[in-house]
Amino acid sequence: MELWPAQRRICDADLLHGRSAVIQMPTSAGKTRATELIIRAAFLSERTSLAIIVAPFKSLCHDIRSDLVRAFQGEPILMDEVSDSYLMDFGIEQLLAQNSVLVITPEKLLYMLRRAPELAERIGLIIYDEGHQFEGFTRGPTYELLLSSLRMMLEPEAQTVLISAVIGNADQIAAWLIGDASAIVGGKGLLPTAKSIAFASWQKERGWLQYVNPLDPDEDEYFVPRIIQELPLEKKSKRERDRVFPDRDHPAEISESVDIGLYLALHLGINGSVALFCGQKSSVSKISRRLVDLFSRKVELEKPSSWSDETELNRLADLIAKNLGDGVDAVGASRLGILSHHASTPHGVRLCVEHAMKAGHARIVACTSTLAQGVNFPIKYLVVTATQQGKEKIKVRDFHNLMGRAGRAGMHTESSVIFSAPPIYDERKDRYKNWRWDAAKKLLDQDGAEPSQSSILQIFEDYKQTVGTPIVLTVDLVDDNLAFADDLAIDAIVQGALKQFPNVSASEFRDYLQGRARAIQSIAMYLAQHIDFEAEDAVAAAERLAANTLGYHLADDSIRPRVVALFQATLKSIQDNTDAAYRLLIKKSPLPPAALRKLSAWIAESTDQLAEAVKDGILLSVVIEQAIPLASAKSLASLSDGAIIPTILGAWTEGKSFGEIRQILVKDDIRVSGDHATADHIVTICEDGFGYHLAMILASIVDLLETIEPSLVDAVTLLQRQVKNGLQTEAALAFYEAGFADRVISQLLAEAFPHVNDRYSAKAACRDNIGAVAAFLDAYPEYFREVAQELANL
């Protein structure tokens, strides 16, 4: 086996002998193979039989597992990608009975450790992939406190490896996580593929691409002339204005940078795969719509489908239509050869898009930052249409993670990153407009990558208003502890602030408080996991647990006492508001303590009602009446009439398509954030609002019933799986959870094999009937036949 330079560095750093380290190397340097080598060394040396890989996104977990299944094919190693449901839905005994690799999200691993802490003692190797995800209140506290817990729970000889292409303060992270600031395997000087940087320029009749020195963008290198020109488009009526492509003059329809980006993609795709990066998913939808419109107006360009696998494109388009409806723009765009990939692409469709790009079935994908989430696309050209993600500037480190997707080692020898907005380059010498150029140069300077920060430290940041009047407020969240805050408590704080400062934006200040409440509630769960609240040293223990966090490690001497005070105030809040039984619930549940209190009180007095609901087949309607008010999903709150939620939830659990669910909203003129419901809205409502937030509440009900009324656990567990995945029958759920991960495909297979009732029997159905399964899937994307074959080989 020939090792790449990055892999040799990992070997030279003694990671194959069990040394712990932070690996800081560019994307595409060969970290996947290095991970395989580290796992092999751990198993062959018998240092452990259990390796865990923690990855922040479900799609990345799937990608890693697929790569490792191929690498270890035919070997007696259990390779499992655990579902992200808050359920103990796999057997620990089986996991510990042989050499096993578990690929898992941080949230699921933390849930498992709080229910089965003894698992930590058996982990001999833990790898954190994309390990810089400490910031932000959505996932940051969970991730930081997971690593904080494992620092205490792992055996001293266990090997810890954190991998990141873009971590800006690796020495600080290594000092905290490993206990050795020098335990870094760096990638300085490693360039897996040559990467060129170009800017679109359009100052004359035809535009060109100006290539610059990647290390000094102010230094021009060469240019490709006359590459961009306006193409006339056919009018659809005599009254219509003249239409051209690219269109520089009508940004309300499509921005100049996006239209030029699409133009470049259509010219470059014949030479290699293209990722068309957009700052917002709405821009991805506009690209699909624009593409269909262009070819309906007979644009004089070759369809990208002509240099792609048209059969596979049509299969994928058919799947999208069955999920979202025939009328969505992504269907027509897929048939023409441009795929879409963003957060509101249905999970199964996303997996098929990724496979189509990897296998070369398609050449162009329009995408958002989901591209930077570790997905192993073989991209030759990255066309950047925006340097912002929504309202926020993209971070330097995130941009370099994005850039790293272009030019995958072993797939390409060179790649290009192209900025499609002409004003960036053309106005670089205008003292009033050169801010775009300065911003682009900062993005290209990897030495300016931001250090990884702590979400716990973010709690102490002032409120800085960005809407309306600029306001800065210092909020004391130590005395006003939010560990047990619910929506009413947060609204009371907002109203108090409005009385004192009338110009405060209620919505922005509420978001500020809700994020910090989530972080403090995560701290409460962390304390509940590790503290004996009745012990005399409980206060000292809270101080030790605070000092164990990354936040404390990164804080200066003025902030550290505030971190400790926050942990001790949270401890006191728990002591004052709970008893021993309630603390045990907080320790195990992913729900905030206030929501958990309401839910446990309802269940304690409603077991008879729940038992009757199970008999009468109305369990969903009884449970959601209590669960929906506790769900914190913005997607559900955005509906103009929340009374529609039970109806669309019922359609979701019955297996209705996203397109059919959208029609329910359209029929009753239900708006989403004031807009007509789109396919993207429906996917977010179902996969996030129902599949994550509401399913998490149902999982907590299962936890509570285990001690209160075990006879109801099976029925509510089934309901949780139905709400999580949007499927009705046990067979459909089993095929989905086994790896097919698409509601259309899972229901198709369930009709053919109705006897299947769990993911193990789903695997057996594939193994015993692989020919029939492949025939059923023949009209669908190739990805699903590969899944079936992989399951048959297990």
Image (cartoon, rainbow, N blue to C red):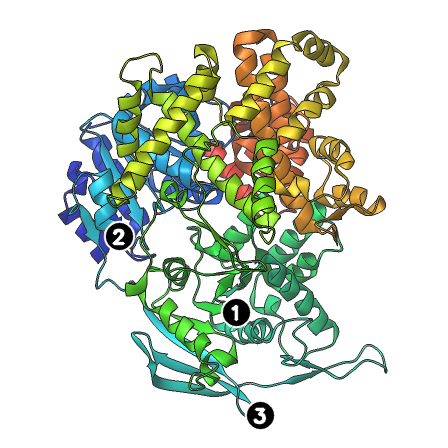
Residue under label 3, please give it. Answer: 205
The label on residue 83 is none
**Mark count:** 3
In the displayed structure, 423 sits above or below 518; it is below
Q: Residues within 10 Å of mark 3 (few under 14, many from 20)?
A: few
Residue 113 in sight from this viewpoint:
no
- The three-letter code of the residue at mark 2 reads Asn
Q: Is residue 205 above or below residue 304?
A: below
Q: Point out residue 157 in the picture as x, y percentages from the top left corner.
A: 18, 28
Residue under the image location 47 percent in, 29 percent down: 483
Disc 2 versus disc 3: nearer the observer: 2
Residue at (68% x, 57% y) in the render: 331
- Mark with earlier residue (2, 1): 2
Task: For residue 721, say whether it is visible.
Answer: yes
Residue position for label 1: 385
Secondary structure under tag 3 reads loop
Residue carrying label 2: 169
State the residue in front, 104 or 704.
704
Disc 2 and disc 3: Cα gap in Å?
A: 47 Å
* Amino acid carrying mark 3 in the image: Glu
Vertical placement of 254 versus 617: above or below? below
- The answer to whether 583 appears left or right of 3 in the picture is right
Query: Whole-percent x and y of residue 728?
Result: 68, 27
Where residue 620 sits, quadrant-wise, is top right
As displayed, is residue 791 above or below residue 118?
below
Looking at the image, which residue sits at the far bottom?
Answer: 204
